[in-house]
Image (cartoon, grey):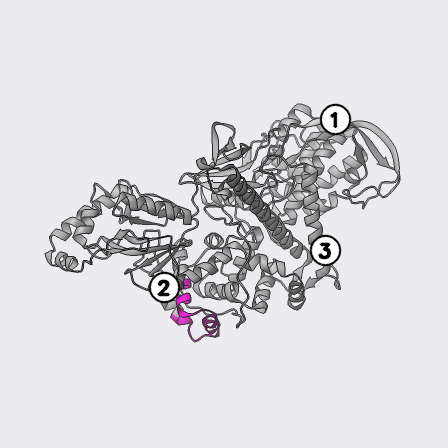
Amino acid sequence: MKNGDDKQSAGPGARATGASTPGTPSLFKRNTGSRSGGGVTSGAAPGTASGAASVSPAVGSVGHSHHSISTHSISGAARALRGKADYTAVASLFDSTEIDFLQKTFCELAKRSADATMDKETFLRYFHLPGLIGEQLFVAFDTKNTGVIDLEEFLMGMAVVLRGNADSRAKLLFRMFNLDADEGVSAQELKTMLLTYFSAYTLIEAASEKANALALSDRIDGGTGEDAAGSGAQSGSPSSSNGHVSLDTLYLEYSLMEQNVLDMLSDAFRNKSMDSKLSYDEFSAWIRKHPRVVDFVFRDPSIIRHQESLNLSRSRKQGKGKPEMSGWLGAASKKGIKRFTQRYYVLAGVYLFKYHEKNDDVPKDAIFMPGALVKPFDSSNSSVHGGTTVKEQLMKGNAEEKSDKSRRSNAASSSKPQSRNEEGSGDKSPTPIRSLTKSFGSANIKGFGIEISWDNGYSRVLFADTPDKQKQWLKKLRRAAENRDISSYYTLESEHFAKGAFSKVVKAKQKRTGVEFAVKVVSKQGLDAIERQGLLAEVAILETSYHPNVMSLENVFEDSTNLYIVMELCEGGNLLQFIEQSAPVCEHVARGIIVQILHGLGYLHSMGIIYRDMKPNNILLSRPAQIRPCVLVWPENPVQDQDPTSPPTVSEGRRENTEAFHGELKIVDFGYSKFVRPKDRLNEGVGTFKYWPPEMAKGLSEYSKPVDVWGVGIIMYRLVVGAFPFIAKEGEDLLHLIAQRPYVTDNERYRSLSESCKDLLDRMLRKKPEDRITVEETQKHPWLAACKYQD
């Protein structure tokens, strides 16, 4: 393989070993509501069951998918659980109506997975918790370690999450925090989870404050009344609604957050070595002293929403509550010639309930709407069953209906008089087959259809009998599914300023504030499973990141063809452009760049994220960089272990007039990034060949976080030397050089470097990953820690 360039990338290779890729909802929206409610109820703690009844696929589902699963099969599985101690625990916490609701919710969610269980991606749509917290909640539910959630695990987990007592919740949290699933929680595991928690909490608070400020501004100015959450920061990005926040302010906020984590870590290991692990009893005692950690998980907005939905499932039976929308809708059926039937639908909260009859107390289906895409149905090129279009089935249904007078007569005799729905408008009872097919004739059906679809291909098609009702249902269902149109909040420029294989980046102006942002427009067409996982990972990382040197998420929108990722607009170009224009640079300029990259990378590693594509193209400058004169102050006796963020602990020595880098750097593009646990190892060959470490170049052997340090070493070498450290000559293979040969040191520029600079390069570019310096260790290296600047 030849040298290539910075744009030459390797596609995903073999699957990771033991690693987890974050699944993220189709609509990547976090609810930024108040964390309140959801009190703890005493009761038996569900344990881990064995020998669960299987939930097998069955025929007779409503809608169309690559597989089907019936409520009857789930009911059978639920009946098989009765008599077990675990089911007794569930029954003691939920009544029969609530268990029925949870069972039907699981049935509906299982249709969106690959089989009759719930996969991780579907689970993380249902529980939209940030980063590793959501990942580990899935692990805590998956007590059988199968990689999917079955009905039994779902019911047991929901019992703890929604109704568990303090002890059962502490056990669930212990399993979540025990990333390596061994005998206890290590200091590193605790730090990783706490940083994830505090980052997400800070972002949610920032988003809430921004939304409140926008709402207040709208009331004062008499604005349009737009949804503040839509125009504000979805994840509460560090950029303010008025534009830019200083780097010093962001570093201060992050330092305070990190110190809070370290204080809690010290408290947990007060009487133990940091190299030891917390047992369950020790962890439980610590968690009782920090109830906000418990609240963050169990009072997360998505969990509060499930608690409210559980109450809504009982409100109809009790005659309480008013739905957002209700009425009769037509739907496709597989039963005989009755091609279309009408059922009564009630939209309450984020659930669409389906009833056989208007006055039924118990719904037949409970459809969880978030993550779905709702749009008018095009009957001309869409099939409902058996590959035939809706029009064809209607014509066939009409012909069969005419040939069966007795069935038509019976259907007509069952017609009910007109009544009024909950919203006060006239609404007919189930239409007889003759009237139904006439109402949904080929001339009208295209305009009255409503399609509810999910990314895995599963969908439902419902039909209103008038255009006005179709419009009303579309509006209400889109709100429940959290579908938002980006054009309602941002004005996008038509020309892009960056482009990739499946994406482009354009400028956009927020309509409410006039602030400009960058929008990454990603086409969902043609993405394979690995590429889709990368896209989901990118958004999951962006929405949990809160660090001045890591790009954060402002908002996300989605339609049937594209995903729109709204981020801070960085107008200074990327680091590759800076290197091509300025390298080689003096060590002092390079130091100002490398220290920021290492700060951002250290944050990602502490969050359990391996980046895997460290190169200058993926480092953006918030503003055009400047190289300014400054005075470099050297201490008399550099201290090896000195914290670079603290003032020098020795007297100041010589001063040197030099230049320094002034600019703010952001790590971007997390398409190859993954959440990893401490013992996880990956084996995918991804990223750009010139920045591959030896462990990748040797043939995709297992690797972990040291691959990112190698990438920083390549960037640093390019900055101070002005060339790549490995240059393949004619007939030589670049990857062989990386894996087997030392980097280039026999040039004048390299020989002129300081010894401390050479030492750091050597430690970053060591062949064996276990010998390579860690990000945390680089912060104490003399080249980064032994001096300070004065303007």
Circle on res. 263: 3
Q: Is residue 439 left or right of residue 313?
A: left
* Residue at 50% in and 42% down: 228
Foreground: disc 2 or disc 3? 2
Above or below, 693 against 431 in this view is above
Image quadrant where one finds the C terminus: top right
Q: Which residues are magenta?
A: 79-102
The residues bearing labels 3 and 1 have C-alpha atoms spaced at a distance of: 38 Å
Q: Is residue 740 visible?
A: no
Q: Secondary structure at mark 1?
A: strand
Q: Which of the marked residues, 3 or 1, is nearer the chain's N terminus?
A: 3
User: Which residue corresponds to mark 1?
Assistant: 628
Circle 2 sits on which residue? Answer: 319
Secondary structure beneath label 3 = helix
Q: Is residue 635 left or right of residue 550?
A: right
Badge count:
3
The residue type indicated by label 2 comes to Gly
Residue sitting at x 74%, y 34% = 591
Front in this rendered view, residue 277 or 268: 268
C-alpha separation, residue under disc 2 versus residue under disc 3: 50 Å
